[in-house]
Amino acid sequence: MNLPNKLTLARIMMVPLVVIVYLAIPETWAVIEPTSGLAIRDILAFIIFAAASFTDYLDGHIARSQNLITSFGKFADPIADKMLVNTLLILMVYSHQANVVAVLLMIARDLMVDGLRMLASQHGKVVSAGIYGKCKTVLQMFAILFLLLRNWPFALIHIPVATILLWCATFMSLYSGYVYFMKLKKYVFESI
């Protein structure tokens, strides 16, 4: 178990922690910024999510720079990302901060890509995240960060940066799903 894999597991363990913080602390408790409704709960969830997101960057950087890329890492890293991102997106829909259609499209894409990965793995091929999938994850993480902050500071000047980022992430999610499908469709049609 090398350091990048330990960081991936740490990211997975942060998922229930951020859920507990977000659901256990009342939304209206200790509001810091009344215009946007930013409260202590949002700040704490933001800190946990930001730390978890940083482990995603860190584990990939360490794995590549120290040649510690493993099959476990290729398998577990995208799962950790999806657990973290999709959980937070669902929490954002639950708290009426994210558009449900955007979130459903991104989750549906993830399910499709996971199915494609499973088919590929049955043929002995481990599929690591491509550049578009990585861009999708980065956009999702930035969208979630601003959603957690209730679009602060942009809420003060009425620019919906969080929503714009969410829809950019949705577009990139769908595009990267299309790229994965085109790359792996031979396994789909082979199994018909």
Image: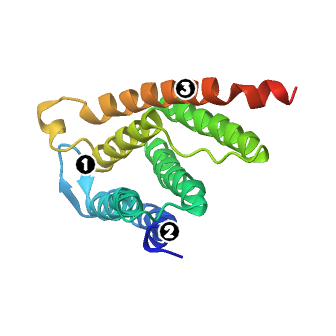
Q: Is residue 8 above or below residue 185?
A: below
- Residue annotated with mark 2: 5
- Residue annotated with mark 1: 37
Q: Amino acid at mark 1?
A: Gly
Closest to the observer, 134 or 137:
134
Indicate which disc, 2 or 3, sits on the residue closer to the N terminus: 2
Q: Amino acid at mark 2?
A: Asn
- Residue annotated with mark 3: 179
Q: Residue at x 32, y 59 (%)?
A: 54
Q: Amino acid at mark 3?
A: Val
Residue 155 lies, in percent from the top left, at: 18, 37
Residue 6 vs residue 56: left or right?
Answer: right
Q: Residue at x 67, y 42 (%)?
A: 117
Q: Is residue 137 above or below residue 51?
A: above
Residue 6 lies, in percent from the top left, at: 48, 73
Query: What secondary structure is found at the residue carrying circle 1?
Result: loop
Query: What secondary structure is found at the residue carrying circle 3?
Result: helix
Q: CA distance from mark 1 to mark 3?
A: 39 Å
Closest to the observer, 159 or 113:
113
Given contact means CB atoms under 8 Å apart, are the residues at marks 2 and 3 in contact?
Answer: no
Residue at far left of view: 157
Closest to the observer, 82 or 134:
134
